[in-house]
Amino acid sequence: MRFAVSGSHGTGKSTLIAAFLAERPEYAHEPEAFETLGDDIELTPSGEPTPEGLRALLEYTVSAVEGHARAGSVVFERSPVDYLAYAAAGRDAARAEREAFLALQVPIVRASLAHLDLIAYLPLPLAGPARRSGGGAGFRNRVDRCLRRALLDDGYDLFGDGHRPAVVELPPLPEPQLAALLRFTAPL
């Protein structure tokens, strides 16, 4: 199974994936693009990736997903959909620039989803986003709302045709999250 854990920054994706891999060591792990490209991604003064930075992160993620298209068991930290949500949530770029980015990238993201079996959406914790540097709580909340709309409401018409991954929302607490993820990825 090839699946992605999606969520705004500060939701516990890395922690959840580490716990999952401890239980399912047969899975390969593809870290999020920012871990690999972070030094090369330009950020705005408010800590958001610039449109060029988002494009690079999205291209890297799509390439990783497509590169593992025939692999057996892979967990991706972020899906290509995450970067649509980041673009939609950004306030530093002009509205027209965000809309142009989305118009260009939605078909690319839609095509890449054929290579995933599952997207596990990790909502913000009940206590709200964790405090951390880069991108304030308001930005994390906007990303979470945009990601929810993209994944659960199919706000970009990403999941309507052909082979598309199942999308599940994980519980808001860590222990039930891991139990749900193990259940959703259990071998048939």
Image (spheres, rainbow, N blue to C red):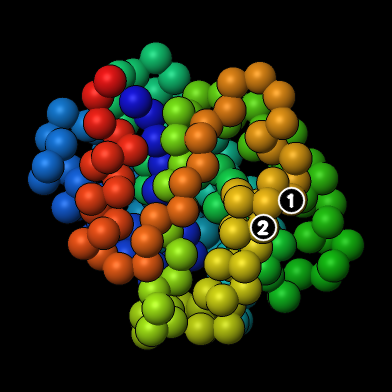
The C terminus: image quadrant: top left
Q: Residue at x 38, y 84 (%)?
A: 127
Residue 154 falls left or right of residue 123:
right
Q: Where does the image place residue 106, in percent across and percent down from the top left?
A: 73, 41
**Left or right: residue 81 compared with residue 116:** right
Q: Which residue is pictured at 15% across the width and 36% down the height?
A: 24
Residue under circle 1? Answer: 155
Location of residue 94 by image quarter:
bottom right
Any part of residue 61 in sight: no
The residue lying toward the viewer, choosing from 20 and 28, is 20
Left or right of 2? Residue 121 is: right
Estimate how packed mark 2 is, as few (under 14), some (14 to 19) or many (20 or more) residues with alpha carbons within 10 Å: some
> Residue 122: x percent and y percent?
42, 59
Dividing the picture into quarters, in which one does residue 145 lie? bottom right
Q: Amino acid at mark 2?
A: Arg
- Amino acid, disc 1: Gly
* Residue identifier under label 2: 149
